[in-house]
Image: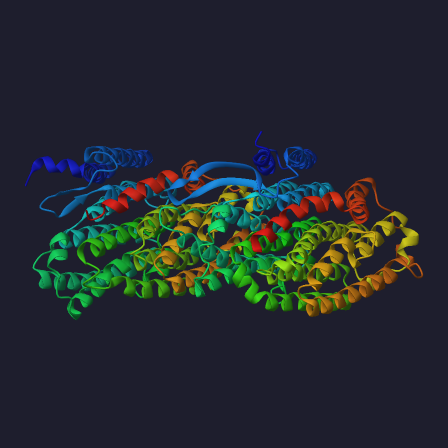
Amino acid sequence: MPILTLTLFLPLAGALVLLFLPREDADRIRRVTLGFSLATFAASLLILPQFEFGRREIQLIEQAAWIPAVGVQYKVGVDGLSLVLALLTTLLTVLSVLYSFRETHRVKEYNLLFLLLETGMLGVFFALDFFLFYVFWELTLVPMYFLIGIWGGPRREYAAIKFFLYTLVGSLAMLLGILLLYFHLPPGQRTFDVLEIIRQRPLAGTGLLAQLAFWGFFLSFAIKVPMWPFHTWLPDAHVEAPTAGSVILAAVLLKLGTYGFVRFSLPLFPEVFRQHALLIATLAVIGVIYGALVAMAQTDLKKLVAYSSVNHMGYVMLAVAAAAYAYGRPELADAAATALNGATMEMLAHGIITGALFLVVGVIYDDRTHTRGVDDFGGLWAVLPKYGAVSITAMFASLGLPGLMGFVAEFLIFVGSFSIIPVFTALAALGVVITAAFFLWTIQRIFLGPTNPRWANLPDLDRREAWTLFPLVVLMIVFGVYPKPLLDIINLTSSQLVAMLR
Amino acid sequence: MNWADLRWLVPELVLAAAAVALVGADLLVPADRKRWLGGVALASLVAAGAACAVLLTDLGGLGAPGVRVFADTYTVDAFAVYFKLVALAAVALVALVSLDYFPGRTPHLGEVFSLLLFAGVGLLLMASASDLILLLLSIEFVSLSSYLLAGFLKRDPKSNEAGVKYFLYGAATTGVMAYGFSLLYGLTGSTILYDIAARLERAGPAAFLAVGMALAGFGFKVSMVPFHQWTPDVYEGAPTPITAFLSVGPKAAGFAALVRTLSVGVPLEQVNWPVLLAALSAVTMTVGNLLALLQRNLKRMLAYSSIAHAGYVLIALAAWKSPWALQGLLYYLLAYLFMNLGAFFVAMVAAEGTGSDEIPDHAGLSQRAPWVAAAMVVFMLSLTGIPPTAGFFGKFYLFAAAVDAGLLWLAALAVANSVVSLYYYVGVLRALYLMPPAAPGPIPVSAGLRAGVLGALIGTLAAGVYPQPLVTFMEVARRLLGS
């Protein structure tokens, strides 16, 4: 059974079904959407029994001819990295759809866009052909534009077009990079096959062209991550997007960038990446500290979470830069593998934790208080015990409390990176301190202290909200205490990459 | 003259006969039956399309070399047939939406279809002409029909203005082109492209001047800067189906004639025309895109966008040494046909429902005509170059040609331009989807228009998702051109 293709196109099939449902029948539309997203989640879980856990290479490859005249094919496959990110995607889509049951405005279009978005995201993780990859990469932009633009906050139009423009600049720069790679393959063997191009590394030793192609890819991924100073679209998009849109944006779309760095930039341009690794590590460290400091200064809870993303994605990039810097030095291979494990773990941790945090913001803002000012609350835990417990757990996880998932990721990143680029790592560790400070301060301002009488009668989490949040909290704790099964999968890709970069 | 050679002209003859018949029929058929005349026009277009397919088999299949008839002045090859089919598709889609547009606006329905068919004849001739005089005549044929069509709504001052402006600019550029052609004749003693290529030995400044002047005529037809000034006013003033036609038909045929003239008639060793066209491409796409940013009127915006797209297509001529170049050009023009016609058809629906061509007045169209608005999303994204649409694959091809030919700067400029263009294309979607409807109630869409939008939508998506069959055809057309 072509399980990857099935997983990939189930959401698209769902979107097509929605197209023919009457728009007035909102309940049925919601249920059909939930059904398709659950089926997709189930299909993605079915990849696991077929996945060979002993194999480091990309596996379960499914391919078909598409545009053979120019060397384009339909080719998908998974390895440890793409598998875990795909699982993250399908899980968070289910939760986002479930959370969005309360959305009453243009329900049909809303759900249709979510399903379309899911196919786009999964395609990016599965694609093993650059043309196919690019198609899916772009496919994620359009639904997100509309999700922000139609269902977003007051400045939605501005935020939506800014998001679209920024990411398109990067995408097109990457397209030129892809074409440069393609045309440097020997004539007659030209292909967009990712594995083949990585094997041949056609731009190795071409000097300027390799530099240009590297920076083309870099621009695309760095905007997506987003790295400082390419991050300015993110606070706008995150703050204006509807809650479920923010969840997907933070949990998955940002990962497309870091995934791109690990999947493509590292193995395609190891020399050039190494050459610029310290510059990129510098940007990462700036992102870590800047993100944390700006988050601390926020009074809007959603903005605070948004900037904490800049901070956390900085850790991922620090680890990736460290791994790149270790290229050609076999004695650092183990450290590089640890850093990459940490990077992937942080992608997952950030996806789960920040996804939960945006839900937490949504729960209180969307139909309870309609305010998210950090200073507008106080003593909320006493009023909302379940909500308080969930929120505080997620915030502790985000600040890296041992025993929760975020700690495992950051620990691995720091351990791995410290042996390779100690000064940068030490500076980045400052970020952890600031993160801890602003999250603790936030917890104190919102949940502790005297109860604000305005909110004395708020209802606690209802069942649907609980169902969207508890799975994430459970995962934070489970993988925080026992990350081994996850690390075993992740480590397949990291060790494979490091072996390639030795 | 060999009468048997006339069989290579069957598509042209079919259209011409139908066009003449329609002029007569317009006088005889009572006013309430005139929609029939449109049906006749459509039938003749389908017949001409079938005749083109027969031409291809007469040639001996897709892979066979072309034939030259009438003393080498007329060439029928896969390249020509491709453009003939593109031109026929353009005229047919425009005729389809004209069925419901012109009744009520003019009593002379037969003349509209007759002129459309005459313009079609000219387009078919342009695609095959391999002689300067024939080329000039066929371009004039298209132009004269187009001037009349643009100014067809006699009581509408804007339509009048469009017709006159188009005529004045057209007459001037044709004059310049004719002068350039006469220089080529003076240099070589022949008007036949094949002979010119053989005799154009000493490329002095005169040859460069001749090519430059000839470019004025082609540049006018394809809206290339600096011969583009007519475009926005004519696009805005002309009846919308005619604007749609002008934006794709003459543009495609203009590129066909330009490609044949340069690639067959002017050897690269004599005049390095790709360098000139690289500069023109850069200027054209940039000017078109920057000015499009400022437009609020949908038709004017699409006019500047049409200029920008001429710039993208010119990349193919700038990157001529890449085998991707001509294929990119062929594909792009077909993609542009579908997406741009589609955009104009949606503009017709919007104008019908809101009585305005201003983009902000189309607010909330997605609530009033959801399927048409969804089609507009595809057309706008395709014009921007977002996959999986035809517009993306076309840009992919053209950018690839530029990278292959080493014109990285031009590819980078095209990328920057694409980003700029996103802003104004998405501006349309913003009005359609993000803004609340100005008036309630669904907008009725006539059957012809619905068929037109659907045809353009299917074309845009199908060519984008599965381009392989087209790529095969284009590959053949490229190999055979000029052989």
Q: Is residue A317 visible?
A: yes
Of all residues shown, which one is farthest toward the top?
A: A1
Above or below: residue B377 compared with residue B229: above
Residue closest to the eye, B154 or A169: A169
Position of A77 with respect to B352 (left or right) is: right
Residue closest to the eye, A89 or A270: A270
Q: Could you say where residue B111 lies in the image, as x and y percent from the top left?
A: 26, 43
Of all residues shown, which one is farthest toward the front?
A: A331
What residue do we see at 12% from left, 63% from top? B201
Above or below: residue A299 compared with residue B345: below
Above or below: residue B98 compared with residue A238: above
What residue do we see at 28% from left, 42% from top? B476
Q: Is residue B435 visible?
A: no
Position of B15 with respect to B199 (left or right) is: right
The quadrant where residue A26 appears: top right
Q: Could you say where residue B327 lies in the image, as x and y percent from the top left?
A: 33, 48
